[in-house]
Image: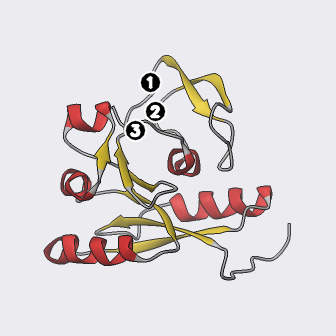
Amino acid sequence: MNALTIDSSTRLYGIVGDPISQVKTPQLMNAYFQQQGINAVCVPLQVATATFEASLRGIMALGNIAGLVITVPHKIRAGALADALSAQARQVGAVNVLRRDAQGAWFGDMFDGAGAGGTHQRPVSATAGAGEHRTRRTAGHQPAYQLLSHRHEAG
């Protein structure tokens, strides 16, 4: 594996929560990015409930933020900041992923428990293009790097 190089084209991802010390997403995503040679990095972002909306609006305004994983206690409030929501997110009234699309709009989705015991279409990798999916059985959470790169259609 090559050493991590952060430059002007590095895609930035964050996991937002409070507390944030328990999360393993950055380690998993960064190992995957490095293994696959993807110029991206994921960092934990501790955001207090009292400053959630202002903090997220500021983070989302940064041009090089590609996506955010949302964890406790912010999943319900995060949906209000998305430009569009998946049917799943609308149904449960919460999101755990916010992705920026090519036009700069933010799409919210909910994957908690997705795939438990079922067969679903999943992206092949963090760089998968539209239509590059494979079917696999999942049990619980899908890796965050795939959620953030998943091509979507607002439903």
Q: Earlier in the sequence, mark 1 or mark 3?
A: 3
- The residue type indicated by label 2 comes to Gly
Find disc 2 in the rendering and name its residue.
Answer: 140
- The residue type indicated by label 3 comes to Phe
Where does residue 1 sit, x and y in percent of width and height?
86, 66
Quadrant for the C terminus in the image: top left
Find disc 3 in the rendering and name its residue.
Answer: 111
Question: Which of the two residues, 153 or 71, is positioned nearer the viewer here?
Answer: 153
Question: Which of the two residues, 105 or 51, is positioned nearer the viewer here?
Answer: 105
Q: Are marks 1 and 2 in contact (CB under 8 Å)?
A: yes
Which element carries disc 1, helix, strand or loop?
loop
Where does residue 41 sit, x and y in percent of width and height?
61, 70
Q: Earlier in the sequence, mark 2 or mark 3?
A: 3
Where does residue 55 sit, x and y in percent of width and height?
27, 77
Where does residue 137 sit, x and y in percent of width and height?
58, 21
Q: Nearer the viewer, mark 2 or mark 3?
A: 3
Q: At x 58% / y 45%, what residue is drawn?
A: 146
Find disc 1 in the rendering and name its residue.
Answer: 116
Q: Is residue 116 above or below residue 74?
A: above
